[in-house]
Amino acid sequence: MNPARLLPWVWFCAGLFWPMLAPAARADRPQSVVRVNVTSQSCDFVRPWTKKTPYTLRGLGAILLNGRVLVTGEMVMDATYVELERPRSGEKTAATVECVDYDANLALLKPADARFLDGTKPLALAPAAIRQRVSLWQIEANGELIATDGLLTSVEVGLYPVGDSSFLTYRFTSSLQLRDSSFTLPIVRDGRLVGLLMRHDSRTQTVEAVPQPIIEHFLKAAAAKPYRGFPSAGVYFTKTRDPQFRRYLGLNGGADRKLGGGVYVATVLKNRPADRAGVKPGDVLLAIDGADIDQDGNYTDPQYGRIALTHLISARHFDGETAKFKLLRDGKATEVPITLSHQRAEDHVVPPYSADRPPRYQILGGLVLTELTRSYLKEWGREWWKDAPLRMVYCDRFQNELFQDGRKRLIILSQILPSPLTIGCEELRYLIVTKLNGVELRSFEDVAAAMAKPLNGFHKIEMEEDPKEIYLDAAQVAASEAVLMKVYGLPALCR
């Protein structure tokens, strides 16, 4: 047969099967997403009187039924301007962040123009099950919506990007390609929203997403103003896989407990829900709200199978609700009701993040005092836990065990700005300050109060490490303030 006669058939077959072979297909659907353009400027926590260079993020927001737009919390962190854009027409309007939860990595945006979303089709929520196929929506530069196929491969409880909280996470496999406006992407099944992309690994073609149950919880809590966040119990557990440990705890079966179950209560945070309810270190948690807990801290979820017990507390309850803990104590099973509450980032001794507000600091004769936060430690880069000062990382990692004395913050000597008052001290930095003028520093508010009371005309700064004590002439400190501000271009000596 003449090869030239076969050519039209080759082109016909290619046109017929190409849409099925292409990794992403064009989606001709009603407009249910908008571009979200965000300009942000974060603070410099090492030089807390300055800010870093502004940067921009572009993503896609999911349009919801109440005229709001849903994006990830990361996208609007430290935002100075938020803008919504219609993909096809290019029409734009400013937007405000109506509600944000950085722990759950979710934010609601409200358009400044109430009519901006007219004519769009809001997305309802829908759950997803393992092995279900979904579509990850993106927008081409020309405004066309495209959908990339994805497969839900696992559901588990994992650590979210911003804070220290663990929530339910969807994991997909998808050959997602990098395109403009891809920082936040809706994940859709049958025209309904099942999640929001928050991480994508192009090497393994793995996508992690905030799932529908977490989104639904966030939206319900946001509707009941003021927003009160996801609850927690304030208790940490240890697995009980060691057979001898289980024998010691009395976990070898019995009328009130099943063989193989239960986790050991290792830490109970003071003045948190579990502590107020009487839970003690050494108790064994057997069940929550009737759901048995295994030796790894998992329970059997009717929808997702074996997942971590954290989901029972954080996503199955709201702030102020009661969870029933079944405990084993002194060989006897007992049920303890715990009224759950949200723990804010600022309630930690070392906050896991500091968003939308500048860091507090005090410059005293060239000594830069500030608060220890995770944001400060992250100034050492992506592997901050290895590169940041070890003592500071240790305090962050073990703060729940180290600081149960009612302390609110750790005050540190971050660095020295060389001046006539700090000769010989220029190399001092990364030291924990315990007292100022004899006043124990348990919060940053204590700094200002202590500075007002010099000791015999001197400011006495006491630290845990060498040199242990620094003395500054209080009169010379006051006289040097204008010079310090001029030499170092400081807008103020304190915030």
Image (cartoon, rainbow, N blue to C red):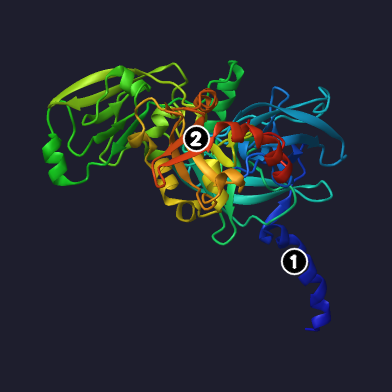
Disc 2 marks a residue whose amino acid type is Pro
Which structural element holds mark 1? helix
- Which quarter of the picture shows residue 226? top right
Q: Secondary structure at mark 2?
A: loop
- The x, y position of residue 150, in whole percent, is 59, 50
327 relative position to 51: left or right: left
Residue of label 2: 351
Q: Disc number at residue 151?
A: none
Are dots 1 and 2 in contact, CB under 8 Å? no
Q: Who's the residue at 53% across and 27% down the image?
A: 451
Image quadrant occupied by the N terminus: bottom right
Q: Quadrant of residue 100?
A: top right
Nearer to me, 157 or 123: 157
Nearer the N terminus, badge 1 or badge 2? 1
111 left or right of 174?
right
Q: Which mark is residue 14?
A: 1
Residue farthest to the bottom? 2
Judge whether 378 appears above or below 327 on screen. below
Res 53 visible: yes
Q: Residue at x 46, y 44 (%)?
A: 431
Residue type for callout 1 = Ala
Q: Is residue 301 visible?
A: no
